[in-house]
Every structure is written in C-alpha cells, then in structure tokens.
Image: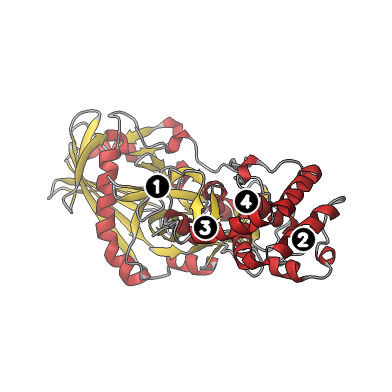
Amino acid sequence: METQTLQPRQTNVATRPGAMYAIQSVGAGGPIVPIQNTFFQELNKQAQDTVVKNLGINDMVPVDEGALGDFPWFWNNLGVFNLNTYQWLNNVFSYNQAGGYVQAASSELTTAYFNVVSGITYQLSAEDQASLNNAVNQNAAVANTLYNDWISFAGPIPASANATTMAAKMGYITSQVILWGATGLTLGALRSSQDPISLLPNMPLGSETVVNDLMTYLANTSAVAGIQSSVLSRNNQLANLRKNLQPAPATATQGWIQAAGANGTVLIEPGMNIAEPIGAIQNALYPTSGGASFSVTMNVSKVDQNTVHVTADGGFGGSGSIGWFGISGSASASYNMFSFSQQTENCTVTMTFNGVTKVTPTMAPYDISSSTGWWLPSVIKQAVNFDPKVGGYQFTIPTSYDFGTDGTFGIISSLIISQLPTFEMTYTSTDYSSFQEVFQEQSSWGVSFLGIPLAGGSQSYYKSTLSQNSTAGTITVTMSPPANSTPVPTLGQVAFVVGAEMQWPSA
C-alpha cells in the first residue's frame, strides 16, 4: 500500500470550540498561564484523595480543557455514539512540564496515529536480511522476471513503499498478491497450494502471469519461507491498521461505529467505546445523596486594574490577567471578579467539585484474527526501541512525537469528571450596596474560568446568591450550576474535566 498522509476530515460538527476558548490572554492584563498553572497544581493536590479512594486511580494528571471545552458525557444516544463525545476524545494529548497537566495537542488521534503508522515498516535483523538477500541473489533471474512482469501489469512500485532492494521489491509484490485472496490468507497457504489461483478470488484481470511468476519464486526460495512470512505478516499488519482508519466504509462494519451530532450529522468513525453506561455516569454525577467531591481554595489580590495575584493553600502562586474569572449576563453585561466594587482588593475563591466520577474510553484494539480494529500501541513502542541486531518495527519516516511517559503523544485511558464547579467568592469588604446593584438585576449568569466559558458560555446556566457577614466584614457571592442536568439537551450535557489517567504508547 502506498504511504500517504491523512488530513483531518471536515465535518458539520465543530471539533473545536472557537476563539472564545483561547487561553493565551483573556481581557486586560495579558496571559493567565501563571494563574492557570497555580490552579492545576492545587487541583492536583486537593483531588488526589477523592480520586484514589473513590475511583481507584493513583496517577491522575490534571487536564486543561481549554482547547476542547467541557466534556460531553452523554455519549450513547439509543445505541449511537455522540459525535461531540467522539471528537472530544479523538485527540492527541501532550504533557505540559511547566504546569504539570496534559492538554490537547491540536491533532486528531486517528489522523496523527495513521500518519505515525504510515512511517513505520518492519525490518529484519541483519542475519535474517542477509539470508533473504542471498536467496534472492541465487534466484536473480526468477526475481527479475517477476519484477518486470509486475511493472508491465501494475506499473512501477511506488517510492513510498521504500522498496530499494530486490528483496524488498519481492516483498512488496508478494504482499499485493496476498491482498487478492480472501481475508486471512497466509503466505504459507499460498506457497503450498496446488491451485493458487483458486485462493485469489480478487485477482485483477491480466494478473495470471504475475501469480505464476510469484509461485516459481516462492518455490525456489523455500529455504527462507519463515523469514518471508514474518516480513509479510508484519507489514500486512501495518497495512491493516491504516486500512482500518481510512477510508470509512458506507456502514459501520466491525471495528467502526456510527456517531451522530445534535444537528443531525452522522459519520462512520474508527471504533471507540466507553465502559460506563449512561445511567451509571449520570447517577455518579448527580447522586440523590452523597457523592464524591473536593474543593480548591485560592486567595486573590488585586494588583492593579488589569492584574491580580493568585495564591493557593498549597503554596502555589502566580500573577496574571484580572480576566481569569468572569461572569456575563443579559444586555452584554460582563464583570471580572473585582468589577462589583472599586473598594475591594482581596477575595478568597473556593471551588467545589461535586459528583466526581470517571469515564473509561477504549479505542478499538487491533484483532489479529479478524484484522479489524486500529489501536495497537505496541507497534509504536517497538519502533521507538528498534534494535537492528534483533529486527522489528522501525521508523522510516522521522516523527517529532515523544511517545514516552509525559511526552507529546498520549491518549486518555480514564477521564475524571465532575459537575461544573460551584464558586464561592468571599470578599473583605463592607460595600454591600455596590454588590447588590449588580446581583439584584438578575440571578442567572454565564461563567468563564481560565478563558473557558463553562457550559458553553450559556448566560442562564449559573445561579447567583449574595450574602453579607457584617461581623466579619465580608461579602460572599456564590455561583452555582443547576442541581441536575435536566435543563440541557441530551447530546449537549457536559461535565467539568478534573483530570485523566493517561496511556503513553512507548511507556
């Protein structure tokens, strides 16, 4: 098969939210990365006990959902995969060393994986390669006849096949002829057949000479039959992985699924599944009582009109844009956390994450018996650790990815989610009237956090309550999400992403 670079497919359902999800700068004050890092480090510290005890996950790492938005947890609608859920999970994630979290790397997983696999070939050990070359050289006339007849029939072997030696050319031609057979045909079965054409029901018109030449070549090189079979089976495995990623079939055959969006878009996608049924996720996210939860507390000081300094209970801290947290209402009303009163300069923010639970996505694993499925990370691991003395899979097209632990090519094996957080903001202030002027006008708001519009930026999702403690000299604003998920359409229901357990292919 000719190697090609797969480009992301265009769909009618957005795979990424728009510019409103950018996190490089929000409002006045420029970057919020120092605040973002402070939050993720504190979240990681505070969430560990809950995640370990309730979910049994010991190596959670926070996830920056900034490029993707909240997680669409309602993944199965009457047996059809939610396209928004699929597109959220179908991403390569990279580890951010400075912040200690993972983030989407702006690459579709299926696209990036296809391109990586396309750059891998199977290479024999030096000893086996010498044996194969010797067998081909001893049968040079037969090999040349087969090669020339192939060119006459099918044209030159594509450069992407990397068939620079006669042994490699023979391997390429053999692999193409095997594809003319029924699924599961092996080189051993073809080699030993007294009627090889009967095993090749998909032979193209005019290919009989090539088949006869190949049978002569196989008979004359039987001394290296094991080596030839090894090369063929490994390279066919790579070809199957590529074939099981694209092109998509007309219907969802084995290893593929149907995914539908809220706007009616239906696509056939490489297989993916989630272990937890919808009911189990919903009951954990919105329990009738109890449920797993944790809180993160940060202290915020106003530096100037554009900048704040944020410190966490765990000792982490950083300065950045005053727009790191904001609320929006009707008639384009918007506020940062110090807009309510010019007399306030200090605030303690406590974020509470209720309904902590997990979803466990799995990519369709490659099944060698049926040649279906597409996820086989061991191929990448072998290529990373290739030893020419032993042979195996190797990269023939360089890749910039780091496939190791905390690298640049990771997938999510468990995703930790919660209800959208409750924000309790306690100000050291007595200017209660200024707060009242804002919050008496309406009680429903949209909330943005670290540049991410929670719940998609809906301006009626969060409810606000205002209270004053005259004795302590404090004013508290509480922003709460709905107590359950019912106000949101089925396919649009989302959860906050707390963290993930990652899989790194070469770890």
Q: Report, in whole angstroms, how far the alpha carbon at label 2 lies from the one at label 1.
A: 55 Å
In this rendering, the label closer to the viewer, 3 or 1: 1
**Apparent side of residue 329 relative to residue 28 in the rendered image (left or right):** right
Q: Report, in whole angstroms, how far the alpha carbon at label 3 lies from the one at label 4.
A: 61 Å
Q: Report, in whole angstroms, how far the alpha carbon at label 2 lies from the one at label 4.
A: 17 Å
Q: Residues within 10 Å of mark 3 (few under 14, many from 20)?
A: few
Q: Please say if the residues under marks 3 and 1 sit with CB atoms less than 8 Å apart.
A: no
Q: Report, in whole angstroms, how far the alpha carbon at label 3 lies from the one at label 1.
A: 29 Å
> Pointer 2: what residue?
216
Q: Earlier in the sequence, mark 3 or mark 1?
A: 1
Q: Report, in whole angstroms, how far the alpha carbon at label 2 lies from the one at label 3.
A: 70 Å
Q: Secondary structure at mark 4?
A: helix
Q: Earlier in the sequence, mark 1 or mark 4?
A: 1
Q: Please say if the residues under marks 2 and 4 sit with CB atoms less than 8 Å apart.
A: no
Q: Earlier in the sequence, mark 2 or mark 3?
A: 2
> Pointer 3: what residue?
486
Is the residue 408 above or below the residue 27 in the image? below
Can you tell which mark lies on residue 279?
Answer: none
Q: Amino acid at mark 4?
A: Ala
In this rendering, the label closer to the viewer, 2 or 1: 2
